[in-house]
Image (tube, grey):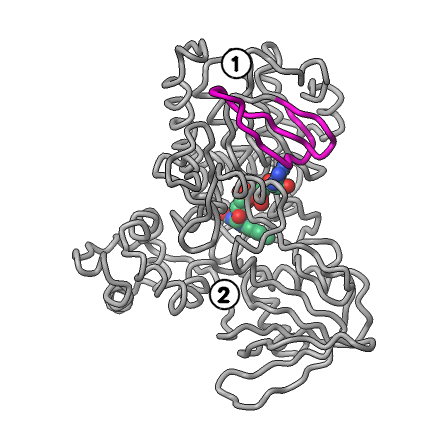
């Protein structure tokens, strides 16, 4: 199936930006709005279209130039690879080989973007974006006859409840649309960029890897997969100077390897309630696997389908302990590098063009041409200074409450939503209803994907979000059905 460009689509698909249509509508006609068209929003839409009656319109809103890409799959850099094997990247949980089959059909014409390795096939993230786009295009075509799915290419900046029946969305472009309910699929909220060209707060922005001088060093704060991405982008732009990456532990993500499966350990009630006991058990399980010639990765992978349950069942204090003491070790074992990336990083370390440091950035002095970074190496007492031409912060938004995102600000200020207990994202119920400031579920606002990771932990990658999207659609259908008499909603 040929991909259709956004330009083609915007011309052929009726967008929901006609002021006459945007005028207040009777409740029964109001669309369900999905805010954010990255992986989570796009797949949420596919499930909603499968599960909702065909007279329930769905409006997909996206502020970025392209739909069905999101932060992860908008990259035009062919060297940016998926960090999950292609065989596990189907967008549809009930069709596990969907992406691999799509790749196979495409490979008959070109193998560009495909990287076969000893640990399996890894595809470029740009290619994955094309795949998502074809899924969205198919949905648009299939629903075109009854115009069930519309795209709204604008930034949602406010949500206000309409008394008893839905919400009015306000868009940056000035439009206002009344909707029946809202699915928040807003993803990883990017930190606000700084005006100083030498300090990059958003590692995914254009500014991060642009216009670097030949030989003056660059500091990346963070040593995870985002750092790996940055190193690739910076190198691709011809930078030949030294890149220094610093994090408190100085730990690099591990490398993917081919592994045999290992069964999920049967955990005791005590292990399910104590992070310390759980980690000890995982260590013992890794030892047991090794005795059978099975790699540690298989043990970590065995936990994955149950991680959300484990997380939810742990007392709050234990989850906090995990975030403080275990997270950085967990992350480097759980989120791994594709072998070509691991090879590049190792080679650059050998050459000296990349240096990984364990330390803590204490502050910057930006007077003068260079940025003087004050830091302390792990275990060292004295403060040191590192002059660099640019600092790129790549260790994520530390606390969601620091976000400057207008929509998030409005949702919190109006009490329609509240942050989760770990300050990582939004608080939601098991059924993915957003929890209001007063602790009650917002009946017609749902959220999914990385924005709810404080509640589920394991919901940031495709294999987990695709399952969550299906649950969310079922919750939406049940929620709207509960409103049926008021909404004249027929199922
Ligand atoms: C660089 C990177 C690489 C990754 N690689 C992988 C991988 O290889 N495999 C894997 O399984 N996972 C990977 N992930 C994890 C990734 O989080 C998920 O795969 C998934 O892409 C998350 O999708 P999302 O739609 O929830 O978030 P996002 O991709 O962040 O998309 C959210 C979208 O919402 C839009 N939006 C936000 N607010 C508004 C608003 N108010 N109005 C309108 N639009 C709005 C944004 O513009 C954005 O397009 C990667 C993540 C990153 C950041």
Q: In which quadrant of the rendered image does the C terminus lie?
A: top left
- The residue lying at 53 percent from left, 58 percent from top is 338
Using the image as rendered, state which of residue 215 and residue 81 is in the foreground. 215
Label 2 to label 1, Cα distance in Å?
49 Å
Residue 179 in the image, given as x and y percentages of width and height? 56, 22
Q: Is residue 269 above or below residue 165?
A: below
- Residue 27 image label: 1
Q: Position of residue 364 (x, y in %)?
A: 68, 75
Tell me residue 147's x, y (percent). Answer: 61, 14
Provide the residue span drawn in magenta.
Answer: 151-177
Q: Residue at x 72, y 38 (%)?
A: 65
Identify the secondary structure beneath mark 1.
Answer: helix
Please identify, in this view, whether the residue under mark 2 or under mark 1 is nearer the observer.
Answer: 1
Viewed as shown, does residue 10 lie left or right of 136?
right
Establish if 333 lies above or below 372: above
Q: Going by the image, does 241 lie left or right of 455?
A: right
Q: Earlier in the sequence, mark 2 or mark 1?
A: 1
In what element is the residue under mark 2? Answer: loop
Q: Quadrant of the N terminus?
A: top right
Magenta stretch: includes residue 215: no
Disc 2 target residue: 253
């Amino acid at each position: 199936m040929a991909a259709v460009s956004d330009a083609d689509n915007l011309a052929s698909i009726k967008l929901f930006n006609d002021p006459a249509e945007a005028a207040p509508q009777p409740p029964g006609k109001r669309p369900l709005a999905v805010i954010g068209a990255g992986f989570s929003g796009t797949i949420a839409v596919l499930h909603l279209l499968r599960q909702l009656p065909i007279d329930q319109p769905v409006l997909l809103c996206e502020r970025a130039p392209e739909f069905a890409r999101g932060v992860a799959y908008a990259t035009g850099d062919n060297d940016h690879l998926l960090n999950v094997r292609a065989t596990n990247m189907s967008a549809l949980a009930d069709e596990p080989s969907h992406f691999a089959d799509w790749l196979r059909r495409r490979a008959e014409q070109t193998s560009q973007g495909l990287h076969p390795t000893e640990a399996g096939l890894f595809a470029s993230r740009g290619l994955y974006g094309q795949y998502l786009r074809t899924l969205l295009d198919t949905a648009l075509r299939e629903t075109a006859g009854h115009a069930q799915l519309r795209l709204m290419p604008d930034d949602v900046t406010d949500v206000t409840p309409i008394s008893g029946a839905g919400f009015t969305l306000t868009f940056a472009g000035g439009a206002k649309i009344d909707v029946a309910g809202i699915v928040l699929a807003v993803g990883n909220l990017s930190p606000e960029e700084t005006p100083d060209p030498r300090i990059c707060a958003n590692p995914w922005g254009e500014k991060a890897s642009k216009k670097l001088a030949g030989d003056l060093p660059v500091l990346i704060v963070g040593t995870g997969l985002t750092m790996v991405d940055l190193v690739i982008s910076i190198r691709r732009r011809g930078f030949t100077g030294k890149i220094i990456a610093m994090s408190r532990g100085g730990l690099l993500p591990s490398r993917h390897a081919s592994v045999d499966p290992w069964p999920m350990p049967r955990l005791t009630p005590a292990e399910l309630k104590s992070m310390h006991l759980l980690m000890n058990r995982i260590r013992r399980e890794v030892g047991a696997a090794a005795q059978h010639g099975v790699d540690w990765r298989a043990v970590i992978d065995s936990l994955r389908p149950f991680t959300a349950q484990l997380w939810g069942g742990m007392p709050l204090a234990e989850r906090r302990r995990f975030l403080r003491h275990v997270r950085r070790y967990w992350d480097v074992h759980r989120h791994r590098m594709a072998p070509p990336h691991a090879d590049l990083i190792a080679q650059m370390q050998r050459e000296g063009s990349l240096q990984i440091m364990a330390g803590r950035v204490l502050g910057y002095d930006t007077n003068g041409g260079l940025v003087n970074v004050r830091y302390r190496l792990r275990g060292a007492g004295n403060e040191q200074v590192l002059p660099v031409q640019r600092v790129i912060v790549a260790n994520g938004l530390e606390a969601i409450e620091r976000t400057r995102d207008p929509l998030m600000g409005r949702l919190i200020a109006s009490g329609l939503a509240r942050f989760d207990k770990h300050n990582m994202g939004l608080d939601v119920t098991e059924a993915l209803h957003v929890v209001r400031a007063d602790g009650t579920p917002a009946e017609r606002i749902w959220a999914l994907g990385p924005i709810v990771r404080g509640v589920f932990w394991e919901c940031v990658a495709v294999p987990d979000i695709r399952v969550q999207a299906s649950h969310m659609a079922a919750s939406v259908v049940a929620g709207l059905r509960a409103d049926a008499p008021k909404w004249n909603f027929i199922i």
